Image (cartoon, coloured by chain):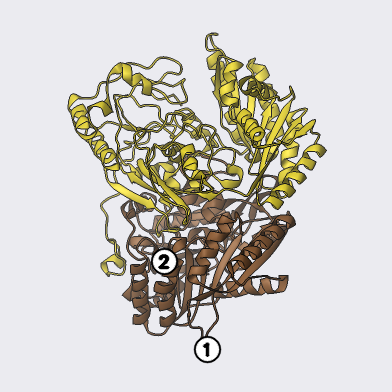
Chain colours: A yellow, B brown
Amino acid sequence: MSAPSLVTPAAPAAAPIPAPPSVVDRLIAVVGDRNVIRDPVDLRTYECDGLTSFRAAPSVVVLPASTEEVAAVVRIAVGAGMPIVPRGAGTGLSGGALPVPGCVLVGLSRMKRILEIDLDNGWIRVQPGVINLDVSKEISAAGYYYAPDPSSQSVCTIGGNVAENSGGAHCLKYGFTVNHARGVRMVTATGEVVDIGGPVLDPPGYDLLGVVVGSEGTLGIVTEVVLRILRKPECTRTFFATFPSTDEGGVCVSEIIGAGIVPAAIEMMDRLAIKAAVAATGVDWPDVGAALLMDVDGCTAEAEHTAAVAVAIARRSGALEVRVPKDDDERMLMWKGRKSAFGAMGRLAPNYIVQDGVIPRKDIARVLAEIARLSQERGLRVANVFHAGDGNLHPLVLYDAKVPGQEHAAEELGGEILRLCIRYGGSITGEHGVGADKAPYMAEMFSDADLDTMAKVRCAFDPGTTFNPSKVFPTPRLCGDRPGPYRPHATEVAGLADRG
Amino acid sequence: MSTTAASLDALAAARQERPATLAEATEALRRADRDGERLLFLGGGTELSLGAPPVGVEVVLGTEQLERIVEHAPLDQIVIVEAGVRLASLQEALAREGQMLALDAPWASRATLGGLVATNAFGPRRTRYGSIRDLIIGISIVRADGTEARGGGKVVKNVAGFDLPKLMVGSLGTLGFISTITFRLHPRPETTRTVLFPDLDADTVRRVVLALRAAQLEPAAAAALVHEGGDDLGVRFDGRFELGVRFEGFEAGVRQQAMKLLELATRKGWAAESLGAETARAFWARHDDARESPAGFRAKLAAQSMDLERVANAAIGSLFTALEVPRCVCYPTLGLAFVAGEVRVPGQVAAAVTAARDALPQGSVVLQAASPEVRAAVDVWGPPPGALPLMRAVKERLDPKRRLAPGRFVGGL
């Protein structure tokens, strides 16, 4: 259960292990000198992602511009026996793009072209470096959008979203990246290019796409993605409600869901999170125990009906106040308050750890009470901002790294919260991914056999564990010998099944 | 040469095991592993004709006694079922809490959830709710070597570990035995209403799909049946469809959407009517008949949704000519269709399949049922997918001795 070697939380990364000159020369031959970063000072930019407490220096960073270049880079790295870590915008919060010492870090930021748009068939083909929000911007004038909306959507990339199976506030109704990715082009561990899925539904074969999305860069490097795009809903109705505490807020959420309403989003913030949002964005939210922000959408009559029912439920559940935005600007401001809650924590404490645990929705009140108890015991403040509709908690553990022992205590508290989620039958991560950060907890959520089965799938794609080693799995797993050469089956021999 | 009939005979000759508990099922897999026996997993038996006939099956492991609903948590909108639970009985239990599994696949009273997952079955509600991969959130399996493993969980939002549930969807029992499945649930709609376009050509069906979207309508289901313009010799495909569009939800929204669609149809000059409860039931019963009536031949066609005219001309038309008592259901928003019927001249049917594949190079034509003669002439799966080497590697890792439904899957896996 130790963190990856040479990686120490909050400590500066060790000096990079230099890449062999012959490798550097070959990489330069593929992508050009300026796209091979090997100066130790320049490499520091890449030594962590959004999880800044873990750092490690890559040996070399390569910035390819095409699928062919990615494939050539993979072949060079594999040939040199160097691990490969793919990276999008580096906004991930679980250390998925954290370099492995001695690795070739493949940055996909130059691959940011939108390749093809087919509105009538409802899809768009993009390179992995395209920013999430730019997909929606590109098709917005035509009345379409891309549904998954992680809070970082103005900076995070589609490639990173595919790796992490990113969600967002609106995935309660619309699903996650995996429900919107229709196909990928991927460079495999052998440096080959393979298309998995595509614009047409139900391609024959195993649902490898379902496995690749959310595999956190451990199966290959995705160089193109076909995304499903949706027509914007006719109408969105939003309301903001305040409550004395998260107890009443939690009851309100359960009652709304129980009334057969599927909100597009339903978010809760506790007192501390509300304070942070107010400080960061100037929203005029009162100092109360909890606030709910909810969107319903669809055709006008349906959205208005469900909004009215939900507001009535909120009042019945003990809401102190219910606000309905008078126009779109006010609505956007409310959402800005919610989406800036993470970043706003900097105004409440010098440092924080954000967790991403999930619990069954009905247990929200009980789990929040336990988190409050843990927070008191440890003497550390915890702010809660979460996707209440699907039980995805984002407890933010506030601390000051300059106070000896606080960072360690904060990490322990974060870990206890994850264990709490496991104990309630939930998950250690709802949308941020396992990465390096939560890999040790995988063994508490899954059995050895579960992890072994996942490892077999990984080995099928990447028998040399070249891609993003030391992520996701709690202990290093070798693939062992391949299970023997392929033997044609009787049906193939008989010519009944064509292997192609 | 293997034939469907021969393989079904072979299945009858195989040892039948019907474990009463999940533990017994695991024990049966361990025993088969020890004895090197090849297995076929059997649910409701509604889709046994899918894939190539598995070869050398010695044990048929049936799930009919694994029919417990393990957990239904209405407040969390999830359910955990054993593989042998039948779809209709699950829906009945969920309805008592005002909920449903948004899966309306055919043969609901016989089909089991394990089988539905293994075959990636779907019905018209896929239009709005997606397919099984969008509804499944957790699974427990027994691997070929008898190891019990689990993926996903019982919360809807969960990205911990690889998505084993999705890997099992549509894998036809070739990667492992499905023992329990966890699904996310939806509220049962307060009301539904169907708008029928009784007579449209393929291009107009396509334009209706675009118009629905342009008008921001969100149908729960849309299905086009081949227009019954036939004579005494049976149904002939004259290129025309009847299209049913169903809205579901709260009364206010359903009424508004149906009205809007009717206004839109009037504006465009398309004949359309909002059906009463009785006639709506009749339309969807015709849909169910077209999907469910027994057929010696059935093909699943997949293309882009805007390619419907090409699907109609190049695939549906020629298959209708080649088949006896042909029938067809299209899901025009999805780009998916089924054509079924009886084989008269195998060579003619095989030629129609080949022509359809040529006409839909980006799509697929998969034979879900076919006579031995047709199977001998054309591969049921069509050309192997580009990712076949990766699929083969997955199969080799999870079933290295090739004992689970050998040969049934794509590429002889």
Q: Nearer the viewer, residue A353 or B163?
A: A353
Drawn side of residue A340 relative to residue A212, left or right: right
* Residue at left offset 65%, top offset 31%: A334
Q: Quadrant of residue A294?
A: top right
Q: Is residue B29 visible?
A: yes
Gap in Å between the C-alphas at discs 2 and 1?
A: 48 Å
* Residue at left offset 57%, top offset 42%: A171
Looking at the rendered structure, the kind of residue marked 2 is Glu
Give the image location of residue B200, x and y in percent. 54, 73
Q: Is residue B29 above or below residue A464?
A: below
Sequence-first tag of 2 and 1: 2
Q: Nearer the viewer, residue B168 or A46?
A: A46
- Mark 1 crowdedness (10 Å alpha carbons): few <14, some 14-19, many ≥20: few
According to the image, label 1 marks what residue? B231
Q: Is residue B105 above or below residue A263?
A: below
Give the image location of residue A206, x and y in percent. 41, 55
Q: Secondary structure at mark 1?
A: loop
Drawn side of residue A387 relative to residue A253, left or right: left
Q: Secondary structure at mark 2?
A: loop
Q: Are marks 2 and 1 in contact (CB under 8 Å)?
A: no
Give the image location of residue B16, x and y in percent. 49, 67
